Structure formats: structure tokens, C-alpha cells
Image: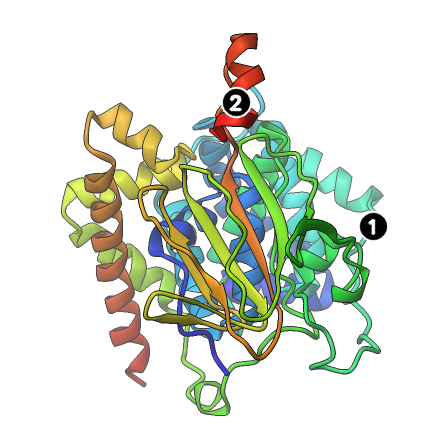
């Protein structure tokens, strides 16, 4: 998928874009439908239009197709459905404190990260996966999740933290292999 | 120097999931500009978002979805262009981009309003009614002016430094305090300390009598 996205960015390749559309379109629609079923189809089109327009800005050293398209869908959903603004980091900001040279040398192969993350998600205790899914899919805050599940806020926070720590450990272990 | 005090995981995850309201996102995005370590974690949280998107139960698109999309591509002329390299020399700017957008420029364009005893603030306008976002300037060696909030307060040091108890907070550092902690951060003696402070908006009461005395009680 990441190669297809790079092709779209480099040469406006419509066939590559169609493959991305057929893979991610139904997933973006499902993601939008979690918050607003009526506008899911329209917002899918808008998200994929942004993907088409911005593909040349995609940087394969910083992300993969799924994570990059996720951030575009997420921002589209915030913009269209919550009408909320959101401060974003600008990766080209001259004020950015750069990585140390050592970290840059260790440039990790991140191309498999989404696959590793998917596999790791399947091994998480269901109570940890549940709070992460409510947060990412339903866009619920930690206190909303606590109310919904009738749990103390601290329990929701610690389940999220534990779940994310396990997933990160898998990425950090997995990326070190050649 | 790299920041020593980082974003809590709950802020990073909520930011990635898209359920953090605007005021808090200003503190998160600004800290990320200072902190390669939290940027790496934030990228991992976006990876989790990507994996979530990949594993969601797909919903079939309308039959004509691709042909509608295809027609829009042909008609579209608007392409994102890579931004031109900026003229500003690195290291000259104090405020990271997300903050410059709210202030309207770098640190020299901040419109300070005196708070008394040499301290000053600038409220940053947002569209988020649930938080208050301000820049604070604390004179060298002086404590942060009394401000009661009761809720969460996330502070990001932009220049100078302050001490809170045993801990020292310098540029890029985050202090994340809930209302239960009684603390008196004090600017270190070398220089004024400029920081960003995001707090829960003060509680609003419907009764006009309570509203009237609220400023007196500072609740």
C-alpha cells in the first residue's frame, strides 16, 4: 500500500490510486460511520480527495500508507463532524528541535509497523483493546469511556497505558530486526 | 538540550485518536516541536491509528463510488505543493509553529498584559470553550502569580526555566498538574520564564448570584 501511495505522489498514477481507494475507501467509510452514518460516504470521498492532493507530501521515512491515511481521515472527521480546530505540528518548522544524529543513523525500517501493530493488537487482553478502540473509533474521551463502561477514570487510563506500552514494545523489538 | 519532562501517554493517545479538544492540542503540538522522543511516540500512536483503520470491519461503498471519485480527479487541478524552503535561520525562533499561528508571530509579537509584580500574560483566543490558553511571563526569581483553577493544568516552558519543589523545568518541558496538587512554581533567577499554560475552563454557574461572587471566591 505504501508503494502505491508513493506512486500516486510521484506520478499521479490513477491505477495506483484506484487500488488505494478500493482498499481504504470501505475502511474510511466504516471509520466515519462510527460517528456519523449519514455522512460516511461523502466524508470518504473528501478524505480520498485529500489523499490524492497531498500524496506528494507523504514521507515514507516517517510513516506508512495506513498511518498517513488514518491521520488524514481523523482530521477530516474532526473538521467536518466536530467543527473543532486542532493544533498540528509542522514537520518543516525551522523551530523544530531535530533528532540527535545517533537516532537518525538508526533509521528503522518502519514499513512493517502496521502489520506488527495489527498482530500485536490481536494478542492484547480484550479489556485493553476495548478502551483503545473506543478512543480511536468512537472518538470518546477517557472520561466518556469511563462513564460508558462504568469504570473509574484511573482504570481506563491505566488500561490504555498498558495496552499502548505492549504495542510499542512490539514495534521497538520488531523494527530492530534486519 | 532535550526536554526532560514529557507528555503523559494519555495526552499523546488522545491527540492521536483525535479526541483532545483544541486547547490541549496546542500544548501537545508545541511540545512535540521541542521533543524528538515524544515525536517518535506520537508516530507510534499514529501507527496504532493506521492499524485500527486497517482492521476495522469495512463498509461497502456506493456502487458508483469509484466512478464519482474518478470524475473528481479529472476535474481537480488543486494539488498540494511542497512548501518552499523557509528563509528563517534555524535556532532563531523561540515559539514553535503551532504557537506562532495563535500569537501571530514569534516571541517579540506577544501582546503582554500586566498581571502585577512584573508578571504578564497573553490570552490566546481559541474556539474551544472547555479550556483557557495563555502565555505567561514570570519575572526572574519570582513565583507564578496566584491563579486558582481546580482542574488540570498543563504548562510548557518556552524560554527560561522554573523550579517547582525539587524539580527544574526548562525549555520544552511539560508540567502536568491536576487541581489537587498545591504548588508554587518559581522562575529561576537567571532570566524571565515564558511559558504556555492550558487549563480547564473555570466552572460556569447558572445562578447570577453565584456568577456575581465567583470572581471574589476565585472559583
Using the image, determine if residue B159 lies above or below residue A107.
above
User: Quick one: SS at disc 1?
Assistant: loop
Q: What is the distance, in whole Å, between disc 1 and disc 2 at their CAs?
A: 51 Å
| Res B66 seen here | no
Residue furthest toward the left?
A: A125
| Res A103 seen here | yes
Q: Of the numbered discs in the image, which one, if any, rests on residue A83?
A: none
| Residue bearing the label numbered 2 | B214
Left or right: residue B88 versus residue B29 is: right
Q: Nearer the viewer, mark 1 or mark 2?
A: 2
Q: Of the numbered discs in the image, which one, if any, rests on residue B78?
A: 1
Query: Residue B16: where, in percent of width, then height?
Result: 46, 50
At label 1, counting other C-alpha atoms closer than 10 Å, the crowd grade (few under 14, some 14-19, many 20 or more) is few
Query: Residue B98: where, in percent of width, then height?
Result: 66, 57
**Disc 1 chain ID:** B
User: Quick one: SS at disc 2?
Assistant: helix
Amino acid at each position: 500500500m505504501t508503494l502505491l501511495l508513493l506512486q500516486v505522489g510521484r506520478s499521479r498514477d490513477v491505477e495506483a490510486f484506484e487500488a488505494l481507494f478500493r482498499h481504504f475507501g470501505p475502511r474510511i467509510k466504516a471509520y466515519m460511520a462510527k460517528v456519523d452514518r449519514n455522512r460516511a460516504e461523502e466524508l470518504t470521498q473528501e478524505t480520498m480527495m485529500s489523499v490524492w492532493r497531498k500524496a506528494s507530501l507523504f514521507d515514507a521515512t516517517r510513516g506508512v500508507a495506513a498511518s498517513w491515511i488514518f491521520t488524514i481521515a481523523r482530521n477530516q472527521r474532526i473538521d467536518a463532524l466536530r467543527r473543532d480546530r486542532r493544533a498540528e505540528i509542522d514537520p518543516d518548522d525551522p523551530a523544530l528541535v531535530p533528532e540527535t544524529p545517533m537516532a537518525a543513523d538508526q533509521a528503522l525500517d518502519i514499513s512493517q509497523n502496521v502489520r506488527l501493530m495489527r498482530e500485536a493488537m490481536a494478542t492484547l487482553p480484550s479489556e485493553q483493546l476495548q478502551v483503545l478502540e473506543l478512543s480511536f473509533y468512537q472518538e470518546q474521551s477517557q472520561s466518556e469511556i469511563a462513564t460508558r463502561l462504568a469504570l473509574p477514570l484511573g482504570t481506563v487510563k491505566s488500561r490504555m497505558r498498558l495496552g499502548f506500552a505492549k504495542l510499542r514494545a512490539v514495534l521497538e523489538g520488531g523494527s530492530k530486526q534486519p | 538540550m532535550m526536554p526532560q519532562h514529557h507528555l503523559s501517554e494519555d495526552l499523546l493517545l488522545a491527540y492521536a485518536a483525535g479526541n483532545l479538544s483544541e486547547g490541549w492540542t496546542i500544548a501537545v503540538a508545541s511540545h512535540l516541536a521541542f521533543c524528538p522522543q515524544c515525536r517518535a511516540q506520537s508516530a507510534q500512536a499514529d501507527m496504532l491509528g493506521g492499524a485500527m483503520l486497517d482492521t476495522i470491519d469495512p463498509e461497502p461503498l456506493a456502487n458508483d463510488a469509484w466512478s464519482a471519485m474518478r470524475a473528481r480527479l479529472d476535474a481537480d487541478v488543486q494539488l498540494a505543493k511542497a512548501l518552499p524552503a523557509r528563509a528563517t535561520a534555524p535556532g532563531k525562533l523561540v515559539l514553535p509553529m503551532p504557537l506562532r499561528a495563535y500569537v501571530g508571530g514569534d516571541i517579540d509579537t506577544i501582546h503582554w498584559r500586566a498581571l502585577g509584580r512584573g508578571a504578564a500574560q497573553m490570552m490566546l483566543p481559541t474556539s474551544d470553550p472547555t479550556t483557557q490558553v495563555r502565555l505567561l511571563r514570570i519575572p526572574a526569581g519570582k513565583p507564578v502569580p496566584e491563579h486558582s483553577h481546580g482542574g488540570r493544568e498543563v504548562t510548557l516552558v518556552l524560554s527560561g526555566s522554573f523550579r517547582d519543589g525539587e524539580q527544574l523545568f526548562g525549555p520544552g518541558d511539560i508540567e502536568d498538574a491536576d487541581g489537587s496538587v498545591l504548588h508554587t512554581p518559581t522562575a529561576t533567577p537567571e532570566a524571565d520564564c515564558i511559558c504556555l499554560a492550558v487549563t480547564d475552563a473555570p466552572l460556569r454557574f447558572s445562578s447570577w448570584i453565584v456568577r456575581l461572587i465567583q470572581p471574589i471566591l476565585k472559583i
